[in-house]
Amino acid sequence: MQIPLDYETLRVIWWGLMGVLLIGFALTDGFDLGVAALLPFVARNDGERRMVINTIGATWEGNQVWFILGGGAIFAAWPFVYAVSFSGFYLAMFAVLVALILRPVGFKYRSKRPSKTWRSAWDWALFVGGFVPALVFGVAVGNVLQGIPFHLDSDLRATYTGSFLGLFTPFTLVCGLLSLAMLVTHGAAWLTIKAELGAVRDRARAYGQIAAIASMALFAVGYGFVAFGSMGYRIEGAIDPAGPSNPLRGESLASAGGWLANFAAYPWMWLAPVLGFAGGALALIGIRAGKEAPAFVGSSMSALGVISTVGLSMFPFILPSSIDPKSSLTVWNASSSHMTLFIMLVVTVIFLPIVLAYTAWAYKVMFGRASVSELNANPDLY
């Protein structure tokens, strides 16, 4: 069978699609995580907590589709990346999994009993379900930027030599806090849209302003680590972008400030970090002024800019090795076969528009503010 797209093009397309799926997850399930992380702070009584929960209660399950799609895409399009990352980050992934399991259980069981202790326990479970993934996802990205301590043997078996505590360094904690602040800003912007006018919305605006300032400051600090901390990798010698998927067929080297090389070669890439800062500033202005649309657009722009900055700075690397750079996984040496990528692309072209159309329709149908009076009148709500 003649495949209409060459191998190199398909690899770049799937690198881009992986970024699209991660951004889609941040923009949709990201505000769910942010709202959950804000729950104990913006709501002071049972009615307010129920209202906050119901601002995301109608859509949180659908939003998690992006997380599943992202994991599935990594597994199918980049099997080496999936194998190394999920093995090396096993305990961190387990912590995220436990936290994510607490979310559906918390939503479903929280209001089943009138006991104050019962409901308070589930409220904190929902907080953990939002706080932990938002933090750990950022820590994971920080570790990827630093380089993962793994190497491949001649049979392409990966050996991870790091530890769970080793995942937490000053830089990775900055990345984790950036992720948390970014998603809390997004969640606060969502609450200004969905929560009824009153105390909860006012508290969300207060915390959202703090989070927006923190996200811009942490993004700047992260840039400082990358620019002045000799962080990055580069490919040594020529490499065939259409060659076989064998991570050992090329050679990589650590390079001081290597993650900024793409920005020097392609100045248009600076649009990504500019978008990250501009989005944070717009979110701050919108939240402070009580303008829901600019606030949410700004927090979305911030997430788009921050995630795009990471992807563009690392290209073509996906998972660099800190102890054996030649084992690093790149767009060119770690993908699935030519045929697999093409079949997956055809399926994506067919079904992704359906997912987007259904998501848009669901949000349109469920549009409107949640209110305490509505909760009292409708016992079917969370």
Image: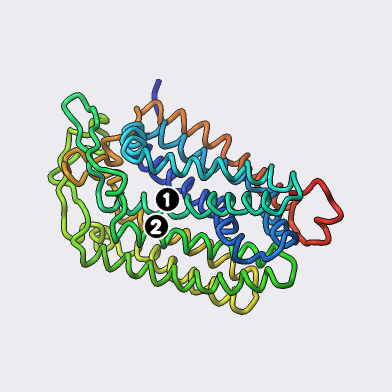
Expressed as whole percent of the image width and height from the top left, the position of residue 141 reads 36, 51
Q: Which residue is mark 1?
A: 137
Disc 2 on helix, strand or loop? helix
Q: Is residue 323 above or below residue 224?
A: above
When asked about the image quadrant of residue 80, the answer is top left
Amino acid type shown at disc 1: Phe
Of the pair 47 and 5, the residue shown nearer to us = 47
Residue 115 appears left or right of 81: right
Amino acid type shown at disc 2: Gly
Q: Is residue 129 above or below residue 46?
A: above
When asked about the image quadrant of residue 250, the answer is top left
Q: Are marks 1 and 2 in contact (CB under 8 Å)?
A: yes
Mark 2, Cα crowd under 10 Å, few <14 / some 14-19 / many 20+, is: many
Find the distance from the CA under tag 1 to the CA under tag 2: 7 Å
Disc 1 on helix, strand or loop? helix
Q: Residue at x 39, y 65 (%)?
A: 271
| Residue projecting furthest to the left | 237
Q: Which residue is mark 2?
A: 176
| Residue projecting furthest to the right | 377
Q: Residue at x 53, y 73 (%)?
A: 282
